[in-house]
Image: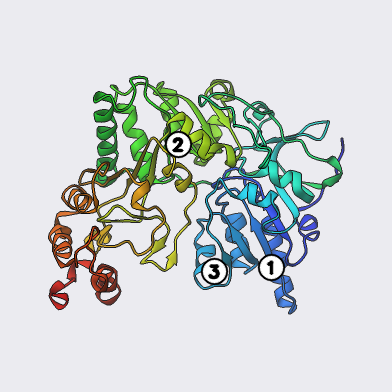
Amino acid sequence: MAFPILSAQEAADLIKNNDNLGFSGFTASGSPKVVPEALAEKAVKEHEAGRPFKVNVFTGASTNNRADGALARANAINRRTPYQNTPDLRLRINSHDAHYFDLHLSELAQKFRYGTYGDLDVAILEVAEVLDNGELVLGTGVGNVPTYAKYAKKIILELNAKLPAGMYGMHDIYLPLDPPHRREIPIYKPSDRIGVPTVKVDPSKIIGVVHSDSYDMVKKFSALDDVTLQIGANVCGFLLGELRAGRIPKEFLPLQSGVGNVANAVLFGLGDAKEIPPVQMYTEVIQDAVIELMKMGRCVFGSTCSLTLSDDTEAEVLGNLDFFRDKLVIRPAEISNSPEVIRRLGVIAMNTALEADIFGNINSTHVVGTKMMNGIGGSGDFTRNGYISIFSCPSITKGGLISNIVPMASHIDHTEHSVDVIITDQGVADLRGKDPVQRAHTIIDNCAHPMYRELLRDYLKLGKGGQTPHMLEASLEFHNEFLRSGNMSNVDWAKFA
């Protein structure tokens, strides 16, 4: 079936001011590249002519510099959800030039089908192949493509030459029925396949195909330093202790891991922890470290929503699909992040925090409580439903000017009720079965940096009683002192005595 071949600019010209757009992909992988760039160029010209031009962008998670980045630099984004991580868009969000609403990744597809956010005008989808019957073979990330493809009024395809035809069969596309007709999602182990390998669309909605030729441009993570290596070792040590104690079954449980250097360090640590059997992943993102574990035989299967790989590793995987075909499956976000499936499989959730407070609450999103960093992503989906929910972060940053263990988190994304374990380079705080004061002492003694432990203990002494002994007027003093002097360790509790 032949579809019109368009240039990126011709495709962009079909998009109107205030259109709702659905992008393919998830954490950069599988995101469109050339059409958003052309759309940004159109926005600049429209603004120069004195005409308004902004669009509303719905994705699977973050995109890339050629999508979110280009559109943000052109000030072409009006509304954005559910997750982002580009510096230019972050600036727009924090200056209120773009209206960003943070959302658990598992929720967006269903809310969109319910009509919560209005109609979807155009879906812009990266594909590896368009089959003769019009079915789409996706690339390295699925995100919310099945929903966007079904509900969009029009579809523009980016056919990426870097994606081989061998991608067919790597995906498991499943769209659940909506309540009250929904049945269980029948996944009972990470490798179960419950859907089909392609996305089926109404061919009449495809208004054009744009050619592209680019990897996903995911940056390599920086080399692991002593701090991240120690965090990784501490996480592995904790998991090994749980296995030895019988609190994790001997065959082990599926793992989920967030994105970033700390998460990669944890996964690399598993490669050396030979007492832990080869693992399976039921996760939202597979990074370079998992590919290395698969090559080592230390990870036998990975269920994911995206292959968020550096360009070199992406080229390696795409060039060796026969090796990886029985080790990987790529699913839609509402399946990879399904609370039902996560709870059923007993997934061990491992995510990162910006800061944790001494009572076990986690801030994943806002610097000093006000400035959006990236968003909550899928951490809530896994944290609230995991068999064990682990959060990790360095004990200090900026050479000790900031303590990542604070009296009260300046913004709370995950409450104490969802957090089982906090791990830093200093050690492990197992919070299970502890009351708030016991949690506080455990976190201070095991996770806080030595230069901040006495300050945190002294804060506890200021408490006004009650089960959770906060002194509210002093509870954010770490953050206030950082804003005043640039150094949290300058806090002086005497003025609150």
Quarter the C terminus occupies = bottom left
For mark 1, give the secondary structure.
loop
Quarter the N terminus occupies = top right
Question: Residue 404: x, y in percent?
Answer: 28, 57
Q: Is residue 374 left or right of 152 when viewed as pictured?
A: left
Tell me the residue that label 2 is attached to: 288
In this rendering, which labeled residue sits more in front, label 2 or label 3?
Answer: 3
Answer with the quarter of the image where residue 450 lies: bottom left
In this rendering, which labeled residue sits more in front, label 1 or label 2?
Answer: 1
Tell me the residue that label 1 is attached to: 54
Residue shown at 72% from the left, 59% from the top: 118
- Of the residues under marks 1 and 3, which one precedes in the sequence? 1
Question: Residue 392: x, y in percent?
Answer: 32, 46
Q: Three-letter amino acid code at disc 1? A: Lys
The answer, for residue 126, to whether it is visible in the render is: no
Nearest the viewer among 450 and 313 is 450
Tell me the residue that label 3 is attached to: 92
The answer, for residue 294, to whether it is visible in the render is: yes
User: Contact (CB < 8 A) between labels 1 and 2?
Assistant: no
